[in-house]
Image (spheres, coloured by chain):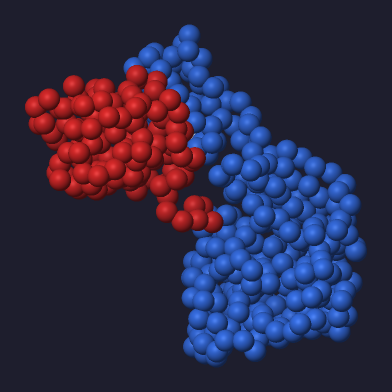
Chain colours: A blue, B red
Amino acid sequence: MIISVASGKGGTGKTLVATSLALSLKDAGPVALLDCDVEEPNAHILLKPEIAGREPVNMPVPVVDLDRCTYCGECARVCAYNAIAVLGKHVLTFPQLCHGCGACSYLCPEKAISEEPRQTGIVEWGDAHGVRLVHGILTVGEAMAPPVIRKVKERTGDRPGGIVIRDVPPGTSCPVVEAVQGSDFCLLVTEPTPFGLNDLALAVETVRELRIPCGVVLNRAGIGDAGVEEYCLQERIPVLLTIPLHMEIARLYSRGITLVEGMPYWKERFQRLFDRIKEIVHEGSRSLKR
Amino acid sequence: MRVAISATGRTLEDDVDPRFGRCRYFIIADTESMQYEAMDNAAAAAGGGAGVSAGQAIAAKGVEAVLTGNCGPNAYQVLEAVGIKVVTGVSGTVKEAIDGYRTGRYKESSQPNVPDHFGMGGAAGR
Ligand code: SF4
Ligand code: SF4
């Protein structure tokens, strides 16, 4: 079972939900928490794992052999990302723009292009409180998050009957799609404000395009208005958990303590949240088979 | 001599576009005769590498210099490779920019003056 935890924007409490959900489920099976927010991973701040292993993330970038190159310009024409330019007797490559698709080396008529790995990030993993945490770190200045996220997703530990929680980066762009893709369910964390509603609606569009069932966690309930709840009713999106605006919750988070550690009675609520998710996923697969 | 100016419109009265890779138009002008042509910048909407793409388009025009507001490292590298001078910090109308260049008011920059993704407008890629 793979559950993604996403939100339209940052700062809605996504990591709070993902970490507490992971910690609450460790009796139900082996749990892995994947922090896919590779530009700003922060689940480790709450879980404090001991790093057991790390692996670099490499992207194959083109290297041109100028002895063979005829400056025909084919590579620059086929590159959809403007990562190669051919100007007179110059071939310039821009590794930071390269997506590593291999089109240029494949199509070069002189076979003048070879590929060389370039590190764009790193994946680290370790255990904390009985949960396997995996996170990726995109090297500062790099633009391509999806390959790092892909590596994080590959590192779940492959344990049968396992539960995987993915902490998805904020927003609705390529990194979000990469992180959510392949999950059985997506939890959308939002706040009951007009901004929260706006971002929620965008996130719902994204997961619906991916055909992944979703439900809402309403965080900081008590502020704002009823807009989000009305929207959820209208769109038939279940509100699966409500976390009130509470001084103690904010204080715990700011001190780097997870909700279920600081307030253990939340554990049961997260377990119930998981049960509801399982029901919805089973419902969905049954109706698909029918 | 011929120069290329990043512009917000298609005439000499339009303003210099502060972005190079993602400007709306380029005006290619002869500084002596003031004859000019305007071209759309096809790279303006590129997902990534707008500077490289725009740089290649300008390189093909055989100009001596580019007058613009800001130029990032990728575009700069392309222009430099073909020996096109880059003048940054240019503002005002396109005509004023050409006059300024002809009278030697501008100095060529020896390096890009803005980081990557400068002209992308807001949080790039997030
Ligand atoms: S396609 Fe190959 S031969 Fe042609 S310019 Fe590119 S590297 Fe050179
Ligand atoms: S590998 Fe793909 S993205 Fe990279 S330079 Fe070649 S064609 Fe462009």
Q: Is residue B41 above or below residue A249?
A: above
Q: Residue at x 64, y 69 (%)?
A: A11
Q: Is any part of residue A275 visible from this angle?
A: no
Which image quadrant for residue A53?
top right
Q: Nearer the viewer, residue A97 or A109?
A: A97
State the image coordinates of residue A286 (x, y, percent, origin top left). Answer: 63, 77
Q: Is residue A93 above or below residue A137?
A: above
State the image coordinates of residue B87 (x, y, percent, origin top left). Answer: 34, 31
Q: Is any part of residue A140 visible from this angle?
A: yes
Extreme residue toward the top, this view: A67
Which image quadrant for residue A12?
bottom right
Q: Quadrant of the N terminus of chain B?
A: top left
- Left or right: residue A179 versus residue A130 is left
Q: Nearer the viewer, residue A44 or A285?
A: A44
Q: Is residue A252 above or below residue B31?
A: below
State the image coordinates of residue A188 (x, y, percent, origin top left). Answer: 62, 73
Number of marks: 0
Q: Residue at x 32, y 23 (%)?
A: B84
Q: Quadrant of the C terminus of chain B?
A: bottom right
State the image coordinates of residue A132 (x, y, percent, origin top left). Answer: 84, 58
Q: Residue at x 58, y 83 (%)?
A: A192
- Left or right: residue A116 versus residue A102 is right
Q: Is residue B11 above or below residue A67?
A: below
